[in-house]
Image: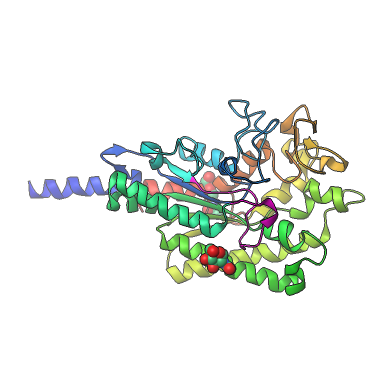
Amino acid sequence: MANFLVFTSYIVLTLSLANCFINGVDAARAFFVFGDSLVDNGNNNYLATTARADSPPYGIDFPTREPTGRFSNGLNIPDLISQEIGTEPILPYLSPNLKGDKLLVGANFASAGVGILNDTGFQFIEIIRMSKQLDFFEEYKGRVSDLIGEEESEKLINGALVLITCGGNDFVNNYYLVPRSLRSRQYSLSKYVKYLISEYRKILRKLYHLGARKVLVTGTGSMGCAPAELALKSVNGECDVELERAAALYNPQLVKMVKGLNKNIGDDVFIAANALKMQDDFITNPELYGFVTSKEACCGQGPYNGIGLCTPLSNLCQNRDLYVFWDQFHPSEKANRIIVKQILTGSNEYMHPMNLSTILAMDSIGV
Ligand SMILES: *[C@@H]1O[C@H](CO)[C@@H](O)[C@H](O)[C@H]1NC(C)=O
Ligand SMILES: *[C@@H]1O[C@H](CO)[C@@H](O)[C@H](O)[C@H]1NC(C)=O
């Protein structure tokens, strides 16, 4: 009998590690998202900001065919990751529908326009800066504790998957926003990158402190190749050299920082996703991935469809799946799918030290 009890509690323990039992209900793993417009799924709809995607044709290929605040024609990266981990899409933290059991699925704290630095994105007026996103996460934890108790709440957070995507705006909407910007007069590019990385490290440490144990950290994509940059600077479709230099400096240092943090913690908490390489693949060879162009945005106006915002008055392509870029900065759903596939199964070049399918497999055997 005693043996039997020990045995069953062992099974219960293993199962709860794998599935995170909540109130005896077999809940799937929770998912939390932090960062900028690449992963915002509607928080900015609730803010007085100019960084928004809540009017058509945004969402034209979304299941409801309606704009939702996602900077995509359809699904974005968090939606596609939710599909992979087998949960419903998570709600924006500011959504009034995020309450009760919905809280247990996770929450998205991202806000279009933010960067690592507080001064990034000031031109968008009201945005949820990274420190505020973390404050909201703490508030969220309190709400979940009220719902299921502190211990279960901690378990839910420890067992969750976290995605954080920011940094691009610190270049595009800060350092390089205007010639001779404040930051560019203050720092050389390499010093600025160092500063960003050291500030990003603090954000990641805070996430760990708040209970995050599996965090996907994406680097910046090929910022200089976005249609917005081509429209401003390109003569023959070549990417902007300065922004390419920034991405080439920033991304390897991010990986190095992530490695150092893991070593410090003694566990592979942070997983670096090489968004630059993922994007470069289809920017250098769009046809290989079924795209007709990586230079022209589907929705926009002017050269490369890269000037101004995507609005009901913009030029709109017929088949969004043929375009790498949906608007002047953001990938199409099709491109997001390719990125998420690499996050899931990519080799070490793309995902360091492991890919998402390895994380999911490890957890299902309770390691
Ligand atoms: C950013 O703002 C928050 C909240 O005001 C503050 O706690 C944090 O120290 C600031 N970060 C930097 C780098 O100034
Ligand atoms: C990534 O995932 C695949 C399984 O889909 C696995 O075979 C591969 O070894 C993984 N790569 C790394 C670097 O973890």
The span picked out in magenta is 108-127
Q: Is residue 21 above or below residue 350?
A: above
Report the side of 302 relative to 250 (left or right).
right
Q: Quadrant of the C terminus?
A: bottom left
> Which of 33/143 is in front?
143
In the rendered image, residue 121 lying in the magenta stretch gets the answer: yes
Name the image quarter holding residue 69. top right
- At x 72%, y 68%, the residue is 183
Q: Position of residue 127 (x, y in %)?
A: 60, 51
Name the image quarter holding residue 299. top right
Name the image quarter holding residue 249. bottom right
In the rendered image, residue 123 lying in the magenta stretch gets the answer: yes
> Which of 279/59 is in front?
59
- At x 77%, y 26%, the residue is 318
- At x 88%, y 42%, the residue is 303
The overriding secondary structure of the stretch rendered in magenta is loop
Report the side of 136 relative to 153 (left or right).
right
Residue lying at the far left in this picture: please name it.
Answer: 1
Q: Position of residue 302 (x, y in %)?
A: 87, 40
> Which of 15/234 is in front?
234
Report the side of 367 relative to 269 (left or right).
left
Q: Position of residue 265 (x, y in %)?
A: 43, 68
Q: Is residue 258 visible?
A: no
Q: Is residue 110 above or below residue 57?
A: below
Q: How many marks?
A: 0
Report the side of 360 relative to 328 (left or right).
left
- At x 61%, y 64%, the residue is 254
Q: Position of residue 88 (x, y in %)?
A: 46, 34
